[in-house]
Image (cartoon, rainbow, N blue to C red):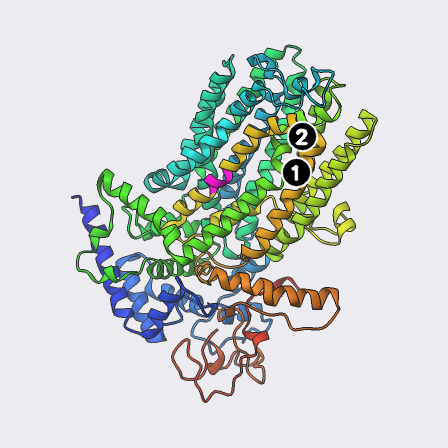
Amino acid sequence: MTDRRISFFNQIELAERAVTTGKKSNEYYAQVHRRRNNNQGIIENPLAHLNDEQLQEDVTFFQQTCLPMVDRTSLLRAARVAQNIRSYDEVARSENPEAGSNLPVQLSAEEKFALKAEKDVLFSERSMFIVILTVSLAAFLQGFVQSSINGASLYSVEFGLPDVVSTRMQSPNVTSIAKQPHLDDWKLGAANSSPFFFAALLGCWLSLPINDWIGRRGAMAVAACLIFASSLGAVWCTTWYALFLVRVLNGIGMGVKAVSTPILASETAVGFWRGSFILAWQLWVAFGIMIGFAFNLIFYTAGNDKLSLQLMLGAPLVPSIFLMIGLYFCPESPRYYMRRRTANYNPEKAYNILRRLRKTELQALRDIYLIYKSVLLEEYSDDFDSDNQSDHVPRGFYGHVNNYASQYKQLFAERRLRNALISTTIVGLGQQLCGINILAFYSGTLFSGVLDGHSDRLTPMLYSLGFGAVNFLFGLPAIKTIDTLGRRKWLVLTLPLMSLLMLAAALATLVKDPGTRGGVIALFMFLFAAAYSPGMGKPSTFLHYMTGFDEYLGPIPFTLISESFPLSHREAGCAFAMSIYWLFAGLIQMFFPSVYAGLGSSGSLGLFAGLNVLAFVLVYLFVEETKRRSLEDLDLIFAVKKRDFVRYQVTRYLPWFIHHYILGRHVEKPSLYVDLIWKRPRPQQDFPLSGGGIGDEYWNGFAFGGGGVGEIPPSSKFTMPETLARASEDSNDSAHK
């Protein structure tokens, strides 16, 4: 055993002993329990069980065993800020230079500016741009691949397969003969769906060991190499089954990349703007689709069908090269090095990465300490009392396989993990049910059918380019709103609107003139894409004017999947949820040619209009809000019973919505959660941030008087009305009012 491994195991043992000494208190046991079964819906700071003396002892231990190169005083300052984040946020916002003078930590002007900016200013951390660029390149590659598959479907004759439109138009009796799906429809569907099926069946599951061994950045590099090899091989395919086999590599790469890339974005971003950072994935997927369609048009002008097809199939290898170059400069996720039961545990590396990604040393030390304490709570078990903690690190092939199998088993066994799995699976499934991917995969085929085959390939390609442009451009204004408005709220508003637009497109197929019919359907499909896209954040946009609200479904599946699982099970949870996502994407690819051959344009569009309604019901009942929470705080959100969440939506929130918005009554909004971090109990008389700053008895975000941290003395004159103790879906947005 190397010295590095011995040192690693010693650190594990020392860390566990620290936990053992700290868990004697009832507060610690309560916190551990709440992160698994949060029956009271309490959202609290992971440091709430520590008083100041205990905090100093814990910081000293952490500094000596994990970050010896860091000054203890600096780390203690950061820990105190982390423990009382709201108080120091108020100090940072105060215009009085004396505000907070009684607090243990006196913030510098630079630190005040940084703490305020990280909550108020999108992309305030300039060093995050290289991560955003890398994530964007990975997403662009994803969209470009989808456009490549879409464009190649119009050249299916080159593989010995007639296109779907021709099988439907080849018989004069369209209502009987041609409505029976042709065998070639299934072959085309198999060739197009193979990347998505193998992403679901192999790629996503392989992402767990790959991420475990070489990290998020390494996994993305593996994915880029696989897509490069697949694109190069597809150029020389002459049969549909050869294309099917080559796309297996593409699918594995897509699965690994789709799991690893959003995780990298979520784990490096500041919690307040995590959704906006992950939004880069869907936004640049849309951009990749648009640019892919544009290149399909360029390749169409080659004048030779075989050459045009080869260019479309081989084009994705170029962005895959750029992704590999970007990964060279991109940092690894700091949380990857904070998983204590792996051989990669290295707090020093994690801190150095955070120091690079955050504006100030205070923010980097605050984040590394909060991650460390949250991981202790996540990984707590009675087995930690054993003397030899090195046994918890998997060794050998069978040890790792058993560890991975155990993680997947725990996804169903533990409430906190099971709830996250239900929510992420429903949102991923909802994106497939909404019908957006029939446009992403088969827009050319669909528009050809709408025009009854009365045009060449150019017109469907132009419509496809329009779809890609709308999908991207309408996503730009809402980069910020995914975090200020929330994920769940706009999902619930978006899906009914999308259902109506899809239904309108289905009814438009009754128009007699092919040219007029194509234009009307394209209009509704473009509006549908605009509603699906990441939102319309400005009142001047057309759809906002028409509907009165912003909406977006596009980025939410990847955002929710990457942020919902704890660090100990993040890859396993994301892999499972993404496999469901890609499985249903593959089923759509596989069956849509046959569905379209049987139902035609109107029936196909009408089917997906109904599926949007189903997706709406599932989202409303089962999906939690996660906006403006740290990754570690989400443990407490998902630990609430799903049954209680559903009951709240049906028996409390829905009646309130009807009374408030339909009947116009002023009824207090109900709440499911009690927030002890940002919605602290208020005194009968407010203490202004002036003079000596916040009073001694009020400086802690969740403690008063001389009681221990996290305690409210019975004799206190403070009250906690529901409206003030609340932290429901509408978390603290004061910075944006």
Q: Is residue 122 visible?
A: no
Q: Is residue 507 visible?
A: yes
Between 280 and 34, the one lying in front of the other is 34
Q: On the picture, is 170 further left or further right than 617?
A: right
Residue 122 is situated, as x and y percent measured from the top left of the image, at 59, 53
Residue 580 among those drawn in magenta:
yes
Residue at mark 2: 599
Disc number for residue 520:
none
The structure residue drawn at horizontal position 36% and vertical position 75%, both measured from the top left corner, is: 51
Between 616 and 259, the one lying in front of the other is 616
Residue 437 among those drawn in magenta:
no
Question: Identity of the amino acid at label 2?
Answer: Leu
The structure residue drawn at horizontal position 41% and vertical position 84%, both measured from the top left corner, is: 706
Which residue of the protein is positioned furthest toward the bottom in this rendering?
715
Which residue of the protein is positioned furthest toward the front in this rendering?
176
Q: Which residues are magenta?
A: 578-582
Within-10-Å neighbours for mark 2: few <14, some 14–19, many 20+: some
Residue 422 is situated, as x and y percent measured from the top left of the image, at 48, 51
Give the Cα separation between the discs numbered 2 and 1. 9 Å
Label 2–label 1 contact, CB within 8 A:
yes
Residue at mark 1: 607
Question: Identity of the amino acid at label 1?
Answer: Leu
For the residue labelled by badge 2, is the local secondary structure a helix, a strand or a loop? helix
Q: On the picture, is 9 further left or further right than 523?
A: left
The structure residue drawn at horizontal position 59% and vertical position 32%, both measured from the top left corner, is: 288
